[in-house]
Image (spheres, helix red, strand yellow):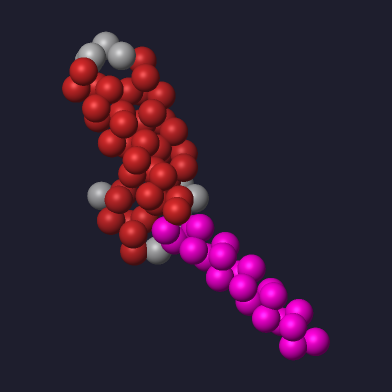
Amino acid sequence: MAGRARRRARQGLKRLAVITIAVPLAAWALEEAARRAQARNTASPWSRRLRRAADWVGGFGRGPLARRIRR
């Protein structure tokens, strides 16, 4: 019984790590890629697509890191 509880706790911690760290980091990386694409070519459709993707991915993020990135 204790092993099952530990396994659930680990799975919960992994999900929490993804939500609080990996998702905001991915959103930030997409936003940076959009900025670079726009700096190279202002008419590039990729910058809009990357920004839209960053907004979509960033919507799943939670915690202080996600809040800082959204500002």
Any magenta on residue 9? yes
Reply above or below: 3 against 40: below
Q: Nearer the viewer, residue 5 or 53?
A: 5
Query: Is 1 situated left or right of 5 in this image?
Result: right
- Region of the chain picked out in magenta, as a range: 1-21
Query: x and y percent of residue 11 in the render?
Result: 64, 68
Q: Nearer the viewer, residue 7 or 62?
A: 7
Magenta stretch, main secondary structure, is helix
> Residue drawn 56% across and 70% down?
13
> Residue drawn 76% across and 79% down?
4
Any magenta on residue 6? yes
Reply above or below: 2 against 22: below
> Residue drawn 30% across and 50% down?
69
Q: Quadrant of the N terminus?
A: bottom right
Query: Is 26 situated left or right of 38 in this image?
Result: right
Name the residue furthest left.
39
Reply above or below: 71 against 37: below
Query: x and y percent of residue 9 in the render?
Result: 63, 76
Query: x and y percent of residue 50 in the render?
Result: 38, 28
Name the residue furthest front.
3
Reply above or below: 13 against 50: below
> Residue drawn 38% across and 50% down?
25
